[in-house]
Image (cartoon, rainbow, N blue to C red):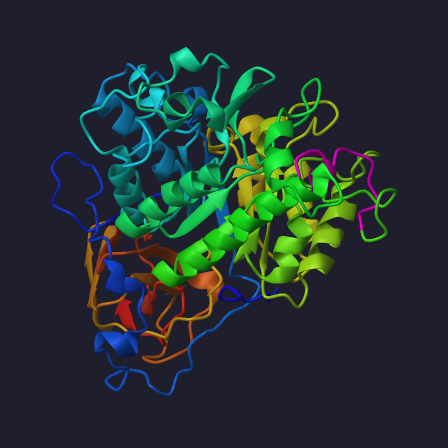
Amino acid sequence: MRRALSAVAGLTGLVLATGCASGEAETAPVPNASAGMPQAQMGLSSADAECPAVKPAGDGPARQVRGMWISSVYGGDWPGDPEAPVEKKKASYRALLDSAKAKKLNTVFMQIRPAGDAFYPSSHEPWSVWLTGTPGKDPGWNPLKFLIDEAHARDLEFHAWFNPYRVGEDNDRRKLAPTSPARRNPSWAVKYGKYLWYDPGLPQVQDLASDAVMEVVEKYDIDGVHFDDYFYPYPSGGDFPDSGTYKKYGQGFKNKGDWRRDNVNKLVKRLSTQIEDAKPWVKFGISPFGIWRNKSNHPEGSDTNGLDSYAQIYGDTRKWVKEGWLDYVLPQLYWAIGDPRADYATLVAWWSRLVRGTGVQLLIGQAGYRMGESSFATGPDQISRHLTLNRKYPEVRGDVFFSAADYTSDKKGFVSALLRDHYRTPALIPPSEGGQRPAAPTGLKAKRSGGKVTLSWKGRATSYAVYRSNGKGEGCAAVKASELLTTTRGTSIVDTTAKAGQTYTYRVTALDRTHQESGPSRASVTAP
């Protein structure tokens, strides 16, 4: 069973202290593998804490995953025009991340294997067509390393988003890169609908999907592995053409549906174990279609009336949760409250009951892209109402928005409503088991100059949380989630939001790779 996650229910004007003349945020050191190890294994100690009597804050409802999906298929949210200059691509990604940080997010889910290809130099698959416009063409740089480094420089978690079975956004095999496994091994991929798909029942395909994921886990400093809802393809005029594979490998199953679900289950279980063995701090999560089964088809299903992942795309999401194969499940609840087919209120309650007591974290996928649709939301408050409803369920530990373009552009004002109602301050990510509380930072200094305050401290943690309160506070006191100012992977920030004539008290805590938080440093007070 994977490491269980707790199931308890930044800012514009804050920058890393940097001397970069260009004005770009300096990339903070990206932790190596040791950053995910318990502090005791790194030789660190909390014996020298400045405020040893103050208990660390621990987990609580204020801790939330706040994320956005960055799609890359067809250029998507990023990189856009594949033939655009590299520096323009880099600038657009940095702008997405800057907006995410300013709008109080803490996680990004970046699509790096959209269609049997790669956004990194791979031993198994060709370069993605969406990087250059030509399948298999080397872009001359390593996008994945850049994407991770820039996210970590802003203390955003980076979850690598893979599509395990989709091969091409066109069913013409000749348009694939010559080095594509689907072109070299024609029997591995089949035409279905408008696209090419790997056949999930083939052992070679299972191996390829696993190898593609583990190559990234082992070589890159990612925080999570992420799958979306695409397993077997959604129905598209007839049955998926895998009769030959079923005849060869389907012995012992009552029907083809059970066999297909087992194929997907094997991959999910296999990756769960492999990721845990390789890097225990790397989370594994899946974002399935929002309906597992309708109650009319199964007594344990939801009181809904729509397509379901179990029978239509052969994803038995309920089993993955019950077996503990996931660190988090992120159902796409892309319906409005009161929708007669699939009521958001009905589904968030169903998923909360499912994860209860399992140790699997529940996040909710929110449909920012649907803002303005008459059947979803004509005003800006629909998604804010979703988050208000989520408060009834302590199992819900955060929300992820599709897509990045809709979130960063504040489509139809829905993000403004979130910032007003729910995201007034940043949030720390819920802690996961397996880590160890790091040593508290020491030597916090605050220097005021004009309209800004420069903070610096000492420490060796993965990241740090900076808290600010009004007035002169005690030297040692507990931190409050409502006073969280920002987080960083460096050991200094510049607070340009400080108001003239106002006294502030600052405190800093340390966090390890699993988001275990230390006690606070001794406070530093700045007077006008």
Q: Can residue 248 be seen in this view?
A: yes
Q: Using residue 493 as the reference point, say whether residue 63 is left or right of it.
A: right
In the image, residue 88 above or below residue 209: above
The image quarter containing residue 313 is top right
Q: Using residue 316 as the reference point, say whether residue 4 is left or right of it.
A: left
Q: Which of 270 and 355 is in front in this view?
A: 270
Q: Nearer the viewer, residue 254 or 447?
A: 254
The majority secondary structure of the magenta stretch comes to loop
Q: Using residue 16 as the reference point, say whether residue 297 is left or right of it.
A: right
Single out the residue that lies furthest toward the right. Answer: 296
The image quarter containing residue 280 is bottom left
Task: Write the start and end of the magenta stretch as one range.
Answer: 301-314
Q: Position of residue 468 (x, y in %)?
A: 37, 63
Asked if residue 271 lies in the magenta stretch, the reply is no
Q: Position of residue 63 (x, y in %)?
A: 51, 61
Q: Using residue 444 as the reference point, say whether residue 36 is left or right of it.
A: right
**Residue drawn at point x = 38 percent, y = 52 percent:** 223
Q: In which quarter of the image is the C terminus?
A: bottom left
Q: Nearer the viewer, residue 100 or 138?
A: 138
**Residue drawn at point x = 18 percent, y = 36 percent:** 23
In the image, residue 49 above or below residue 501: below
